[in-house]
Amino acid sequence: MTWWKGSVWRVVAAVAIVAAGVAAGYILTSARLRNEARPEPGLEETHVSGQAAVGGPAVPVIGPATRLVVRTTYLKCDRTVEETIAPEPDTVGLSLEALRRFHPEWTVVDFTPERVVVREVKDAWCPGMDPGEMERYRTIGIRDGRVTVFWGKPRTDQPVKETTVFPADALQPPDLRLLEQGYVLEGDEAVAQYLEGLAE
């Protein structure tokens, strides 16, 4: 009888150990799954939608027909340029999280299988603007009734460097005609001297 009683206790102890292990595994797995279900920081700022996969949750990805809208803000010309392009071959099949890792410089605004919208900021001049010319030359002209200093030489999309306090209607006729055409100077020192002359 003693032998049987000892075996029962061993079986009970083994069952208790196995049950404790299963319970611990269940608790740890549940906690891990809850943590994985939480969105990454910033995800709540992104609109994400897609169709549910058969037998699983929706995980939208970029497809070959997805339209990629890139909104680039160029700090030096203070403009945002938007272009719609086809996705790069390396981005086809990427989810939102994978795209963020692939292009960390982008802020994803909208993410659907049909359309992905991203923002990026570049400390550069707008496309088509020669950096050397923009840094070297200034054009003094008239904008919104005021004497205005522009970056670079005269062009239709010329970025404003500074709007002065000088009203255009206070200028002498020769100065007004000159500035209406755009008066090009080299460097900020030449601009300062010219503006001092207008103030006299």
Image (cartoon, rainbow, N blue to C red):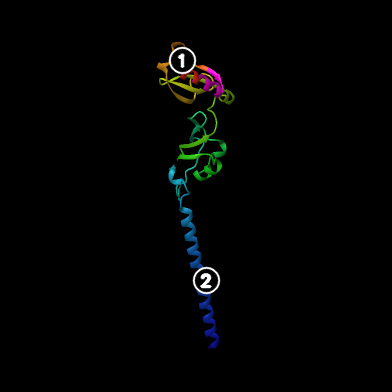
First to last magenta residue range: 184-195
Residue 118 can be seen, yes or no = yes
Pointer 1: residues within 10 angstroms few (<14), some, or many (20+)? Answer: some
- The answer to whether residue 112 is seen in the rendering is no
Furthest residue toward bottom: 1
Q: Secondary structure at mark 2?
A: helix
Task: Indicate the amino acid at tag 1.
Answer: Glu
Q: Name the residue rendered at 54%, 84% in the picture.
A: 6
Type of the residue with mark 2: Val
Who is closer to the viewer here, 197 or 46?
197
Q: Is residue 51 above or below residue 122?
A: below
Query: Which of the marked residues, 2 or 1, is nearer the chain's N terminus?
Result: 2
Residue at left offset 47%, top offset 60%:
31
Foreground: 166 or 56?
Answer: 166
Q: Which mark is residue 156?
A: none
Image height of 105 relative to 197, above or below: below
- Vertical comparison of 35 with 81: above or below: below
Q: Is residue 6 magenta?
A: no
Residue 190 included in the magenta stretch of the image: yes
In the image as oriented, which residue stretches furthest toward the front? 200
User: Mark 2 — residue?
Assistant: 18
Q: Residue at x 48, y 56 (%)?
A: 35
For the stretch drawn in magenta, the main secondary structure is helix
Residue 16 in the image, given as x and y percentages of width and height: 50, 74
> Alpha carbon of mark 2 to alpha carbon of mark 1: how far?
89 Å
Label 2 or label 1, whichever lies nearer to me, is 1
In this view, which residue lies farthest toward the top?
174
- In the depicted structure, whether residue 118 falls above or below residue 158: below
Q: Which mark is residue 180?
A: 1
